Image (cartoon, rainbow, N blue to C red):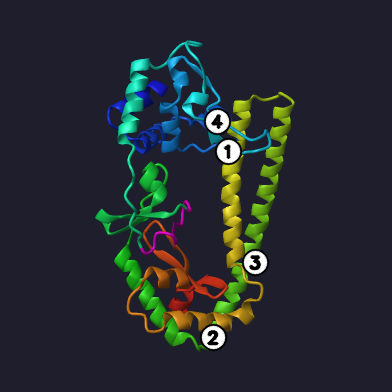
């Protein structure tokens, strides 16, 4: 697999494309090979690059590539070349030195400053309803597709394509409807009832996340004890902690998002929330990033491209499509 990665890169294939090929061919990731629990089957371009830049494959033992302040610290710093400890020809080479050097030169020549990415109006709030990955804007499709599909292909997810103009039209239509129905008591009662249901659901999700965080923290502490007792190597400890930290960061981000959208007193906030919505949405002729981010919490896109739009009402957010259909 190492030889394949080097060969494909020298043939002109980039990090992410190589990662996608490996994933689609069911090649296990380094974390899976190391039997790390909860290891992902998806290859990433960063993993491919790490392999391409690893001098161990030319038969050299290189130590001190990264350092930590202490055994309890997870933050790692990359050492400069002059600080590396290199012992040559310690084991059989997988890659020739000429091939390795050619790859390093190619990586260096391809390294460039990326142009500033243009910000699209829905980039940060569109989510794939099936895999929960963010959506990516594609100019040739005039809309957004699932980021997991875009990065890993059909094996990971389907496109979930939604056109940007169609989404704008739906939102502007929703806003007009909400503003004309904002004083309807039955409409507000339905919203209040569903906000309470959303709150209970969020509380259950929050409890589940906190349980997972607690278990991962325990695993991390156990790994440290095993490392201190010389039961596992430094590399195995580092790989395990890196995997756990990655999962912990995702869970903590999800926890913060849930906590920020949960309201403690929904009924009393609903009236002020409607005033909040009206103050922003009145007299809108077109959508801007500022208006979108203030009015919309998130948009989930189903496989057929149907959006579920969660509008902000001050401290609360809710999908209004069901109410709009019932009332209209």
Separation of marks 1 and 3 at Cα, in angstroms: 31 Å
Circle 3 packing at 10 Å, graded few (<14), some (14-19), many (20+), is: few
Nearer to us of marks 2 and 1 is 1
Is residue 189 visible to the viewer in this orientation of the structure? no
Residue at the limit of the structure toward the front, as seen here: 82
SS category of the residue bearing label 4: strand
Image point 60% across, 79% down: which residue?
269
Residue 12, magenta (yes or no):
no
Disc 2 target residue:
186
- Quadrant (top left/top right/bottom left/bottom right) for the C terminus: bottom left
What is the number of the mark on residue 243?
1
Q: Which residues are magenta?
A: 121-132
Is residue 21 visible to the viewer in this orientation of the structure? yes
Of labels 2 and 1, earlier in sequence is: 2
Frontmost residue, 34 versus 284: 284
Disc 4 target residue:
66
Separation of marks 2 and 1 at Cα, in angstroms: 49 Å
**Do the numbered discs 4 and 2 sit on residues whose CB atoms are within 8 Å?**
no
Residue 299 spot, x, y in % from top left: 44, 64
Nearer to us of marks 4 and 1 is 4
**Do the numbered discs 4 and 3 sit on residues whose CB atoms are within 8 Å?**
no
Disc 3 target residue:
200
Nearer to us of marks 2 and 3 is 3
Residue 70 spot, x, y in % from top left: 67, 34
Image point 69% across, 43% down: which residue?
217
Residue 125, magenta (yes or no):
yes
Residue 238 spot, x, y in % from top left: 60, 32
Nearer to us of marks 4 and 3 is 4
Circle 1 packing at 10 Å, graded few (<14), some (14-19), many (20+), is: some
Q: Is residue 16 above or below residue 306?
A: above
């Amino acid at each position: 697999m190492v030889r394949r990665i080097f060969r494909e890169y020298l043939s002109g294939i980039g990090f992410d494309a190589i990662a996608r090929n490996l994933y689609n061919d069911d090649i296990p990731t380094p974390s899976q090979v190391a039997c790390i629990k909860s290891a992902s089957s998806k290859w990433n371009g960063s993993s491919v690059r790490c392999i391409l830049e690893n001098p161990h494959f030319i038969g050299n033992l290189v130590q001190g590539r990264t350092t930590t302040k202490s055994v309890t610290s997870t933050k790692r710093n990359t050492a400069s070349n002059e600080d590396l400890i290199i012992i040559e020809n310690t084991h059989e080479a997988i890659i020739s030195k000429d091939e390795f050097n050619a790859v390093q030169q190619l990586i260096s020549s391809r390294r460039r400053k990326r142009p500033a990415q243009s910000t699209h109006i829905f980039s940060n709030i569109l989510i794939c309803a099936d895999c929960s990955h963010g959506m990516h804007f594609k100019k040739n499709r005039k809309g957004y597709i699932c980021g997991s599909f875009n990065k890993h292909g059909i094996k990971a997810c389907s496109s979930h394509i939604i056109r940007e103009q169609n989404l704008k039209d739906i939102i502007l239509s929703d806003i007009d409807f909400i503003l004309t129905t904002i004083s309807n008591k039955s409409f507000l009662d339905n919203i209040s009832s569903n906000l309470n249901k959303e709150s209970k659901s969020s509380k259950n999700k929050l409890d589940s996340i906190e349980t997972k965080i607690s278990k991962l923290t325990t695993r991390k502490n156990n790994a440290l004890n095993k490392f201190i007792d010389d039961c596992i190597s430094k590399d195995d400890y580092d790989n395990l902690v890196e995997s756990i930290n990655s999962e912990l960061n995702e869970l903590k981000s999800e926890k913060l998002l849930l906590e920020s959208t949960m309201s403690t007193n929904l009924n009393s906030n609903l009236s002020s929330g409607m005033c909040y919505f009206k103050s922003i949405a009145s007299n809108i002729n077109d959508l801007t990033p500022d208006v979108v981010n203030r009015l919309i919490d998130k948009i989930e896109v189903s496989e057929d491209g149907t959006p579920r739009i969660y509008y902000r009402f001050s401290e609360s957010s809710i999908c209004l499509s069901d109410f709009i259909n019932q009332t209209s």
